[in-house]
Structures are given as C-alpha cells and as structure tokens.
Amino acid sequence: MTGPQLRLEGVSAGYDRSTVLRDIDLEIPGASVVALLGSNGAGKTTLLRVASGLMRTSAGRVLVGGQDVTRAAPSARRRHGVCLIPEGRGIFRSLTVRENLLLQIPPWEKDTSLDAALDMFPALRTRLGDTAGRLSGGQQQMVALSRAFFGSPSLVMLDEVSMGLAPIVIDEIFEALRTLAARGTALLIVEQYVNRALAVADTVYMIGHGRITYQGSAAELDQADVLRHYLSHDLATAPGSA
Ligand SMILES: Nc1ncnc2c1ncn2[C@@H]1O[C@H](COP(=O)(O)OP(=O)(O)OP(=O)(O)O)[C@@H](O)[C@H]1O
Ligand SMILES: [Mg+2]
C-alpha cells in the first residue's frame, strides 16, 4: 500500500440539508496515531462515519493507502484495511460473545480462530458462551474492540471507546490501542479524556463546528492547552459573536 493510511481532502458532509463538516483536510501518514479532539457536536463522529463510508461526502475526496475510496461502501473500505469501532460499541447484545466475535471476522479471512482477540482480552475466554448484554461495560467494549484484531486492519478508528468505563478498565483498553500501534496499525482516536489521547497520539487535530481549527504534534500540547483552544474557538464562533 502506498500513500498515507488516510487522507481527507476538502471534505464536506452533513445530514439532510444541514452541512456538518466543512472543507476538512486531515492526513494520517503511515502507521501513526492521530487524536481528533473537539467539544460536543463538533463533528467528530460525523468525520469517522465519512472516513469509514457510512456517510457520503458532499464535496472532497477520501483516500486510503493512496487509493480514492470516496464512493466505496463500508465493506469495500474494510477490505482496504479500514476498521471503525463506533460510538456506543455496536455489538449484538442478545448474541453470545463467541457469536459476536465470529461476526467480526472478515469473510475473506480463512483463519476463524478467535485467538487474535482473546489473546489481547483474556477475560473474554471464560465468557464466550454468555450473552454479550450480560457482560460488564468494560468487557462489552473489549468485544467491540476485538474487531480491530481480526483481519489485520491498517487503520483503526475509535469513537470514544472509554465512554462510561472505570479508569482501570480504560487502562486496559489503552493498552490494547498501544499494542495495535506497536504492530504498525494507524489509529484515529476520538476521545473525551484529553490526557489519555495526548499520551498515545503523535498528532492532534482539533475540530470545532465542523472545521479543523488546529493541527500539531501531541508532544507540544497539554490538557489545559486543548481545553483553552476548545473554549476560545467555541466562543469565537458562537452565534452572535463578532
Ligand atoms: N443523525 C443525525 N442527523 C442529523 N444531525 C446529526 C446527526 N448526527 C449528528 N448530527 C449533528 O451533526 C453535528 C455533529 O455531530 P457529531 O455527532 O458528529 O458530533 P461529535 O463531535 O461526535 O459530538 P459528541 O462529542 O457529542 O459525540 C451536531 O450538530 C449534531 O447535532
Ligand atoms: Mg460523537
């Protein structure tokens, strides 16, 4: 694969008649970790939907590994190595853990062993026969994250995977993300815990009201800088401001 893992060029997108994303340029060069930060309603989830093919662009291009996938369906993008862990986990609560994991293995994968995920999340081994809805929130999130361990995706996008979880469980989840990154998987992380995101990211993009308002090295920022940026941008662009 040549070119950046993900590149959005001048992307606009929205719902019905409302435009949410406006002229977004974003790039994940190679196997790096990018944090996408922004306040509520800024357009983070929408950006991940557009990148994974769940939503169409109204302008601009989406490239994965240098290939134009702007018109490609989510399943085709998955074949190009794109994996989305959606907000709210996106697992089947009434199916067993084993059934959930089997559904996550891409159809073109010959190996149907669950070990790739179970080695990362050993706590799931004893729960394979249980209905996913009966698991703790942390274990449900592990089931959701297992998708990233099947089929060797080259880009994993994660939408607030720490939502509602205890700090000790979030530690485990971020350990799994570090493992993915160490294997050479590019990550695009949307995360409300700014410090957690900064600790793992190489690059930070900030989004406000559907526009990229900042791009820079994660090492140059701390949580206070990020929150100041949200605040100044939200105030500067609030309706009625000069
Ligand atoms: N299905 C939808 N239909 C119409 N408008 C939507 C839909 N989903 C989101 N929006 C609107 O699009 C804008 C961006 O929403 P989005 O969910 O992308 O933000 P976000 O940055 O992920 O926010 P949060 O931090 O709350 O998750 C918001 O104004 C939201 O109200
Ligand atoms: Mg969101």
Image (tube, grey):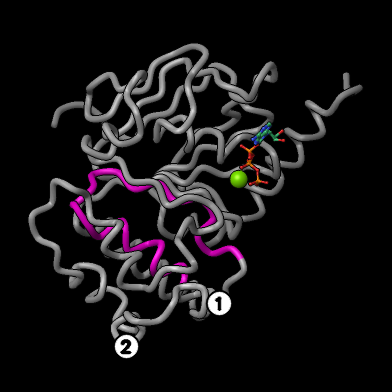
Ligand 2 under 8 Å from disc 2 Cβ: no
Disc 1/disc 2 C-alpha distance (Å): 23 Å
Ligand 2 picture quarter? top right
> x and y percent of residue 222 in the render?
57, 54
Q: Which residues are magenta?
A: 140-163
Q: Earlier in the sequence, mark 1 or mark 2?
A: 2
> x and y percent of residue 203 in the render?
42, 43
**Quadrant of the image containing the N terminus:** top left
Q: Residue furthest front?
A: 94
Q: Residue furthest left?
A: 110
Q: Is residue 66 above or below residue 202?
A: above
Q: Residue furthest top?
A: 59
**Quadrant of the image containing the C terminus:** top right
Apparent side of residue 233 relative to residue 86 in the rendered image (left or right): right
Apparent side of residue 187 relative to residue 184 in the rendered image (left or right): right
Q: Is residue 225 above or below residue 63?
A: below
Residue at screen point 35% across, 84% down: 123
Density class for disc 1 (Cα within 10 Å; few <14, some 14-19, many ≥20) is few
Q: Nearer the viewer, mark 1 or mark 2?
A: 2
Density class for disc 2 (Cα within 10 Å; few <14, some 14-19, many ≥20) is few
Dividing the picture into quadrants, the one containing residue 17 is top right
Instruction: Confirm whether the magenta stretch covers residue 144.
Output: yes
Residue underneath mark 1: 167
Picture disc at residue 194 = none
Q: Amino acid at mark 2?
A: Thr
> x and y percent of residue 129 in the render?
34, 81
In the image, 135 versus 44, the foreground residue is: 135
Dividing the picture into quadrants, the one containing residue 100 is bottom left
Residue underneath mark 2: 126
Residue at screen point 35% across, 61% down: 177
Q: Amino acid at mark 1?
A: Pro
Dividing the picture into quadrants, the one containing residue 15 is top right
